């Protein structure tokens, strides 16, 4: 599910998540060229370095637009801006899954939270 690249430690794993909405939940249409928007979050076990991570979610399709943000979290799961840079890149949606690259630029493992927006 996750590939480790050079200079990385243990691969982060999903620790918890919000109640992600299902495609069948019947949310209201948004309008324009966007029919639906979903939001969810996941917390991850500590890591540092660069990883390819994946999130399974049935609302994601090959033509979805997926936006992912990442931030460090404290022991209570609260997001904050610390000294470590968290960089998300190379977001690639597929049917029921999104793969993305995360780089946590710190010398020791840090826990993180990813917030995900899906536009269909």
Image (cartoon, rainbow, N blue to C red):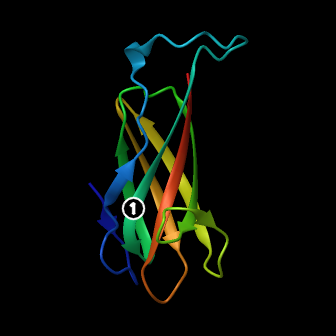
Q: Secondary structure at mark 1?
A: strand
Vertical order, 19 against 14 (above or below): above
Q: Is residue 19 left or right of residue 113?
A: left
Q: Quadrant of the N terminus?
A: bottom left
- Measuring 60% from the left and 13% from the top, which residue is drawn there? 35
- Which of the 4 image quarters holds residue 81? bottom right
The residue at the far bottom in this view is 107
| Percent x, y of residue 95 | 35, 29
- Measuring 56% from the left and 62% from the top, which residue is drawn there? 78
- Measuring 33% from the left and 56% from the top, which residue is drawn there? 14
Vertical order, 34 against 40 (above or below): above
Residue topped by disc 1? 44
Vertical order, 61 against 76 (above or below): above
Please tell me which residue lies in front, 83 or 6.
83
| Percent x, y of residue 75 | 46, 71
Q: Quadrant of the C terminus?
A: top right
Vertical order, 101 against 117 (above or below): below
Q: Is residue 61 left or right of residue 12?
A: right
| Percent x, y of residue 28 | 59, 10
- Measuring 34% from the left and 31% from the top, which residue is drawn there? 96
Please tell me which residue lies in front, 5 or 49.
49
């Amino acid at each position: 599910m996750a590939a480790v690249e050079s200079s990385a430690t243990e691969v982060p794993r999903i620790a918890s998540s919000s109640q992600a909405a299902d495609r069948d939940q019947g949310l209201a249409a948004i309008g324009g060229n966007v029919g639906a928007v979903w939001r969810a979050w996941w917390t991850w076990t500590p890591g540092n370095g660069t990883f390819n991570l994946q999130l399974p979610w049935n609302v994601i399709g090959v033509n979805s637009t997926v936006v992912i943000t990442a931030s460090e979290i404290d022991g209570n799961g609260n997001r904050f801006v610390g000294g470590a840079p968290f960089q998300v890149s190379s977001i690639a949606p597929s049917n029921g899954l999104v793969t993305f690259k995360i780089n946590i630029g710190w010398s020791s493992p840090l826990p993180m939270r990813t917030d995900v927006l899906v536009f269909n």
